[in-house]
Amino acid sequence: MCLVGWVVKIDSLGRRLPESGATMTENQTIQLMQQDLTGITDRQVAAVLDLMQDGNTVPFIARYRKERTGSLDEVQIQAVEAAYQRVTALQDRKAAVIKSITELGQLTPALEKQLTAAQTLQVVEDLYLPYKQKRQTKATVARAQGLAPFAHWVLRFPTTALEAEAKRYVNKEVPDVAAVLAGAHEILAEQFSELAAVRNWVRSYTGRTGQLRVTVRPKGEALDELGVYQQFYAFEAPLKRLSATRILAINRGEKAKILSVKVAVDQAVILNYCHFRLIGQHPTSPAAAFIEAAYADAYKRFIGPAIEREWRAALTEQAAAQSIQVFGQNLYHLLMQAPIKGKVVMGFDPAYRTGCKLAIVDENGKFLEKAVIYPHKPAPEAKRRAAAGELKALLLAYHVEMIAIGNGTASRESEQFVATVLKELPQDIFYVIVNEAGASVYSASPIARDEFPDLHVEQRSAISIARRLQDPLAELVKIDPESVGVGQYQHDLPAKALADEVDAVVERAVNRVGVNLNTASVPLLERISGLTKTTAANIVAYRDENGRYTSRAQLKKVPRLGPKAFEQSVGFLRIVGGKQPLDNTDIHPESYPAALTLLAAADLKASDLGTVTGTAKLQAVALAPLISATTGLETLKDIAASLAHPGRDLRDGMPTPLLRQDVLTMADLVPGMKLQGTVRNVVDFGAFVDIGVKHDGLVHASHMGPKFVRDPKTVVAVGDIVDVWIESVDLKRERIALTMVAPRVK
């Protein structure tokens, strides 16, 4: 994403420019941004914003401008971008509020100073509240009736009775003293509710001491047939200690009309504060009781409910942000799972009534054959008997080496069926349970229809399952990543924020790995830094028309791929077996002269790249003398690493899928049994692990190590292969509790 005019600009006289919000210098902008940043210097912030202003992408900056940014990674650069967007939004809102109050003729120097100094949107909104245009209220009616002067008189804490003064305001619209007092009460209650200092204190006190109280609604238990929300039927916890999963679960239960939710706080303390602030040294004035009733009513009707809504919204926003982060991290690890290269794979899409769809792809993912077998009830017995023979024939005919079984409906029954068939074959064939979430979304998409126009939806799904084993990243980018099911309550999260995180994660994964320019699909290419859907399609079209790419320089001939897009993308696009060996590395063409200098210093030729001898020579070269005006030390280190491992794939160091030949059932599990499993999902309270039975087991955070683990993401990631022990098995509820702590030997 490119930033436009990152500094909140001022003219030569320091006056605010209309499109820029309130006046701020570059240093003030950065200082305000630093509230959201940790471990990033002002110089680094300025460098990132300058680079973005010049149209550079996050992956390009992270990889090829390390000297400028001090080696910030993609996550840190995105944090700088997000902080900038928050600050500019704050400045724009300040400018709009100042303009609005000015037009009302009520902007004072003191108020302008307060607004200019405000560091959060909440403070700005609190200050603006008294000046906001409102719908008609009892207070506005009372003001229209001429009662504002009387209310202001009351605030001067007179020594005379209020009723005597109130008689002066009786008229046709306000027929008696009681009506005058009632109108003044409304004016004062509304005025007190709009005091920024009071609202801020109550907000802070509620956050420090408030409790979230949850109860079941009168008919809630009947609606909660499965007891999903049973733990919240009588639940109370401090606002500051609520976890993201609890907040989102409670919100969902409230939305389903099962739970009733309330923020509880000690109102006596709040009213004492209001008394001190609003009555202070005038407790004996006849107006004291009247003012006390007004501020108590202000809290009950206005401040209390508003602050409760704010805190509920803030808690939800925090929980959503944390859950989006969890989703992003899980998605990244899912995308970065090690590919199974050079294997003929059968995709096995399980089903009962409609049969299991099979698809065989070759070592490069090319579709070879499809079939449908019926190994499960309610299929006729004859079809079930024939299924094993049909599966064997396909496995042998196409020399299948791996079977990828989707983990959806009938997955475990299909696993048992496959395991039985594999025992009858002379050669070793392994199977892997593959997360098929989103496969149906892909198979019905325009991308799938373009790839396989002659196949049915379910047959495309089987191909996708097979390819997910061969290259998870290349296949998963074809579907909506929000459909892959590696988060917590993702369907309850803000759609735009989740989509932004997903885009950033997919972009990070694809660009860190890089793509083969001669095999990459359009969906994969459009995730590359600097490329769009149009330029990605043009790259593939050029390849189809002119044959495989032999040089990165050929990209300059692709229609609509200009110099900036070439600069941003070319380093992430690889050519295997091209004219220039450096084209199969992540070295940017702008650094080819530096790479050749480094090769010369190591006395190496291109043919030596990747050899043991070549790597040793590269490691022996002193890099400091090779630093130049265009190539710094960090870039030289990256060049040396790329030369030592040309064509490297970062995913090769990731855990490989767990291969199986046999299957377990829940009835086989006993406490203390040791198994290996694959981490399928990581959430705030633990991780779900596939151990080869029908249901994933849960390793709670308290069972991830000898001590309680506060953040499971620091211990495991999606795709990890872990050793676990059975803690307990609940056959009735189909729940398995696991532990990663080995049982003590008695």
Image (spheres, rainbow, N blue to C red):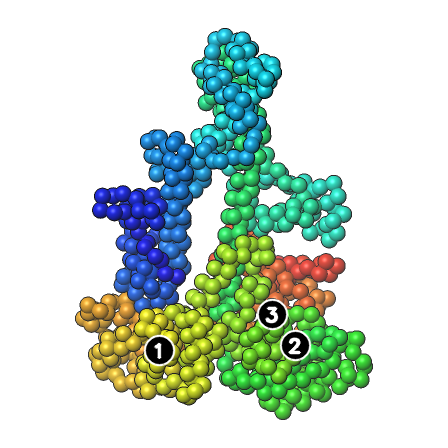
Residue shown at 33% from the left, 47% from the top:
18
Query: Label 3 crowding class (10 Å Cα cut-off): few <14, some 14-19, many 20+?
Result: some
The CA span between labels 3 and 2 is: 11 Å
Q: Upstream in the sequence, badge 1 or badge 3?
A: 3
Of 56 and 261, the residue lying toward us: 56
Q: Which residue is mark 3?
A: 441
| Mark 1 residue type | Thr
Residue shown at 41% from the left, 88% from the top:
546
Q: Nearer the viewer, mark 1 or mark 2?
A: 2
Of 734 and 57, the residue lying toward us: 57
Query: Label 2 crowding class (10 Å Cα cut-off): few <14, some 14-19, many 20+?
Result: some
Residue shown at 39% from the left, 46% from the top:
92
The CA span between labels 1 and 2 is: 38 Å
Of 467 and 54, the residue lying toward us: 54
Residue 458: numbered disc = 2
Q: Secondary structure at mark 2?
A: helix
Looking at the rendered image, the quarter that the C terminus falls into is bottom right
Q: Which residue is mark 1?
A: 585
